[in-house]
């Protein structure tokens, strides 16, 4: 539909023209050279024959992603595959750790399970160069306009809501959106109620439970053993803690993207949970605002309960709580703590600011244990 042209991804019939525009960009060609070395010309030739976005993703995105995995991830796992269905388009809502890798790895998990790859929600603040917008729109991304206010913001929210609903209900597409605007810098993953209200704007009912049901919301829990951007996040947390505003520039966003892609991640798990329509319908809340709070909590609880907790998380929890809740080998603990300190040093902080990196890894443990305790006391 023409009304969505400003935000929607490119379609198959638009691929050729968009790609021909993209390969005129020197920086994009440099990316191809970086990942494919002397074989990049061969890939360019193959891409000239591509006719669909899915072919483009398999031919270009998949091998690039596999190269990143080989160099930065020691073990990648996808769990909950039994909750995926090729005949049930849905809106995946996940916690958000990394700008590029989160949706990219979700796509890979879906691809491995013969599920169509997702259309990806991406904030316009990340489109730091014109060719990047062309590239992400070729790669099934739709744009979230964040630099608006007042009436323009409301109109943009309505359009975004309508596009998401249209894509799932009318086009049978799978979509992904993070549970909040931006990454949770402190690891305390909470779904923004405003996100749910935005999604409900295009519904046929003022009852948010009924408005959200056609979107078939499916939570995804993302767990990284090591977050390559943990030092950068600690710097932001420390700056805010001193009362100073932290104003991120386009160059900062680019640095976070590059660091997240190329940095050490260790073990990584993505857990796909079943759709929560049944849970949503069981909510007793009738007031719209209370409904959004209740549904946000449902999503959070599902995400919390399906975290994979690695030794980095467990040690951070032990250090922050000053307990020995989790048993960790002394040599392992020593190595992890040294890693935390090195990450702080890399951004100009010291061991005195250790707290700002510990909370990033400890909060998932706190939230997970809270759900576990709640379930055992029922």
Image (spheres, rainbow, N blue to C red):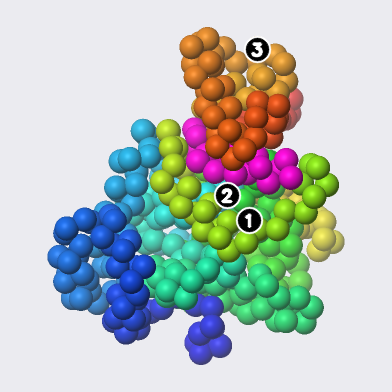
The residues tagged by marks 1 and 3 sit, at their Cα atoms, a distance apart of: 33 Å
Image position of 364 (left or right of 107): right
Q: Is residue 23 magenta?
A: no
Could you tell me residue 98's position as x and y percent? 52, 49
> Which numbered tag is attached to residue 324?
3
Residue 108 appears anywhere in the view: yes
User: How far is the residue under mark 3 from the one under mark 2?
Assistant: 28 Å
Residue 20 left/right relative to 181? left
Give me the disc on residue 96.
Answer: 2
Q: Decide: marks 2, 1 in contact (CB < 8 A)?
A: yes
Vertically, is 28 above or below 344?
A: below
Q: Residue at x 68, y 52 (%)?
A: 191
User: Which of these two is toward me, 251 or 217?
Assistant: 251
Which residue is more in the foreground, 204 or 261? 261
At horizontal 62% and vertical 38% (from top left) the residue drawn is 348
The residue under label 1 is: 182
State which quarter of the image contains the C terminus: top right
Q: Going 57% across and 12% down the picture, which residue do you hit?
A: 327
Question: Which residue in the rendered view is the most extreme toward the bottom?
Answer: 2
Q: Magenta span covers which residues?
A: 223-239
Provide the secondary structure element on which disc 3 rests: loop
Tell me: residue 88, above or below residue 265.
below
Disc 1, SS: loop
Along the viewing direction, whichever of 39 and 200 lies nearer the viewer: 39
Instruction: Give the label, 2 or 1, closer to the camera.
Output: 1
* SS category of the residue bearing label 2: loop
In the rendered structure, which disc, 2 or 1, sits on the residue that comes first in sequence?
2
Look at 39% across and 61% down and name the residue there.
Answer: 117
Q: Which residue is situated farthest in the front direction here?
A: 348
Using the image, determine if residue 50 lies above or below residue 111: below
């Amino acid at each position: 539909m023409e009304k969505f042209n400003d935000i929607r991804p490119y379609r198959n019939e638009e691929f050729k023209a968009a790609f021909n525009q993209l390969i005129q960009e020197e920086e994009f060609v440099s990316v191809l050279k970086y990942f494919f070395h002397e074989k990049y010309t061969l890939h360019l030739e193959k891409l000239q024959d591509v006719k669909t976005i899915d072919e483009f993703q398999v031919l270009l995105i998949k091998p690039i992603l596999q190269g990143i995995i080989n160099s930065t991830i020691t073990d990648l796992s996808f769990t909950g595959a039994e909750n995926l269905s090729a005949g049930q388009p849905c809106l995946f809502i996940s916690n958000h750790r990394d700008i590029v890798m989160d949706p990219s790895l979700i796509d890979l998990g879906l691809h491995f399970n013969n599920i169509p790859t997702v259309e990806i929600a991406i904030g316009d603040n990340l489109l730091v160069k014109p060719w990047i917008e062309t590239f992400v729109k070729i790669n099934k991304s739709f744009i979230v306009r964040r630099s608006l206010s007042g009436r323009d913001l409301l109109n943009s929210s309505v359009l975004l809501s309508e596009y998401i609903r249209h894509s799932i209900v009318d086009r049978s597409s799978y979509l992904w959106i993070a549970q909040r605007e931006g990454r949770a810098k402190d690891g305390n993953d909470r779904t923004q109620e405003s996100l749910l209200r935005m999604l409900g704007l295009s519904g046929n009912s003022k009852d948010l439970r009924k408005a959200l049901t056609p979107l078939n919301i499916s939570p995804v829990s993302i767990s990284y053993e090591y977050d390559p951007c943990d030092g950068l996040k600690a710097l932001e947390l420390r700056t805010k803690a001193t009362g100073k505003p932290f104003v991120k520039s386009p160059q900062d966003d680019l640095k976070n993207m590059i660091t997240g892609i190329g940095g050490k991640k260790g073990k990584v798990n993505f857990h796909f949970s079943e759709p929560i329509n049944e849970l949503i319908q069981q909510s007793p809340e009738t007031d719209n605002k209370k409904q959004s709070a209740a549904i946000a909590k449902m999503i959070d609880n599902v995400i919390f309960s399906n975290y994979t907790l690695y030794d980095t998380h467990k040690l951070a929890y032990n250090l922050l709580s000053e307990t020995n809740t989790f048993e960790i080998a002394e040599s392992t603990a020593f190595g992890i703590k040294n890693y935390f300190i090195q990450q702080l040093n890399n951004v100009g902080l010291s061991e005195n600011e250790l707290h700002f990196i510990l909370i990033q890894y400890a909060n998932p443990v706190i939230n997970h244990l809270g759900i576990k305790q709640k379930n055992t006391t029922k």
